[in-house]
Image: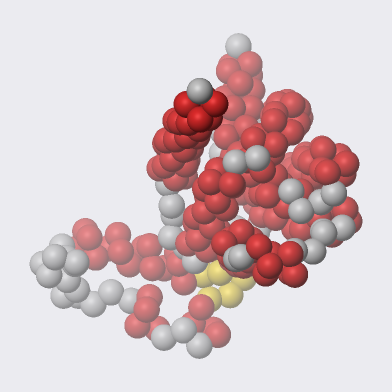
Amino acid sequence: MEIAIALVALTAMEIVLGIDNIVFIAILTDRLPVEQRSGARRVGLGIAMIMRIILLLCISWVMGLTTPMFEWTDIGAPESWFTVEDHATGPDGETLTEVEIAIKSKHLEDVRGVSGRDLILLLGGLFLIVKTVKEVHEETAGEEHHAETAKVVTFQGALIQIALLDLVFSLDSVITAVGMVDEVWVMIVAVIISVGVMVLFADKVSNFVSTNPSLKMLALNFLLLIGVMLLAEGAGTHVEKGYIYFAMAFSLIVEVLNIKVRSKTEASTTTASIE
């Protein structure tokens, strides 16, 4: 029973953590020829599944990535960034207590070290931000500029970009899974089930996003937010993902309601013009 509960909980977590992956794949494959988009989505999610399974089978190596490789001070960061004075003050100007100073010192000590995971998150965050900003620029530019610069992404090129970001998402997902379940086989089954669910809805999500420009722009801003979150995590500042996913869900619901209102308004206008 405990294993069944753990499997359900882990599968649900994998699906939630895979939302940003689906959005990224939807945006990226939208630049492919129509006949290749569905195949690229499935192959992209297949790559994500294989990558996560490989990481789970190399779990000892993955957990070793959390061990600091060097410190920021080794590459020129000032020592003052990682020390707390005895009479330090907080944002409100009040002097911190000994307990608060100890907590802050512990946090700065943790931030001082840079692990392999941190580097992957930093590079992944930068990659996602650059990619998203470029896509936003393409969407907001005029028709002429879009026609000149819009290049059809190759199937192989799309898969390479998907694989690069899958590595970042998979690494974070695997490290989170290890904290929830001890049995590797349970993690692998959860990954397979979650990817299967994502494959079922990938086309519907992608088509819905691509046919609604405002929703596509919202999705791009989601990716930009996730890129910033990856940078923050890589720099040692923990960001509660629950708040971000709640904000994303709330914004999505509002935008879907706006789409329905606009559709009814357009239908009413068309009916009135016909009459």
- Image coordinates of residue 243 in percent, x first then y, are 40, 42
Q: Nearer the viewer, residue 229 or 210?
A: 210
Which residue of the protein is positioned furthest toward the left in this rendering?
Answer: 94
**Which part of the image, by quadrant, shows the N terminus?**
top right
171 left or right, relative to 88: right
Task: Residue 68: name its quadrant.
Answer: bottom right
In the depicted structure, whether residue 249 falls above or below residue 27:
above
Return the x and y of residue 137 as percentages of the image width and height: 59, 65
Q: Would you place residue 260 above or below residue 93 in this image?
A: above
Q: Can residue 145 be seen at all in this image of the molecule?
A: yes
Up-down: is 37 above or below 109?
above
Residue visible at 40% across and 83% down in the picture: 79
Q: Is 79 displayed left or right of 136 in the figure?
A: left
The reply, left or right, for residue 61 in relation to residue 13 is right
Which image quadrant is residue 69 in? bottom right
Q: 159 or 70, which lies in front?
A: 159
Can you give x and y, in whole percent of width and height, for residue 96 in the image? 16, 65
Q: Which of the colour schemes (rainbow, by chain, secondary structure, one colour) is used?
A: secondary structure
User: Which of 202/193 is in front?
Assistant: 202
Near-viewer residue (77 or 166): 166
x and y, in percent, of residue 97 in the image: 15, 62
Q: What residue is drawn where x is 76% and y is 48%?
A: 29
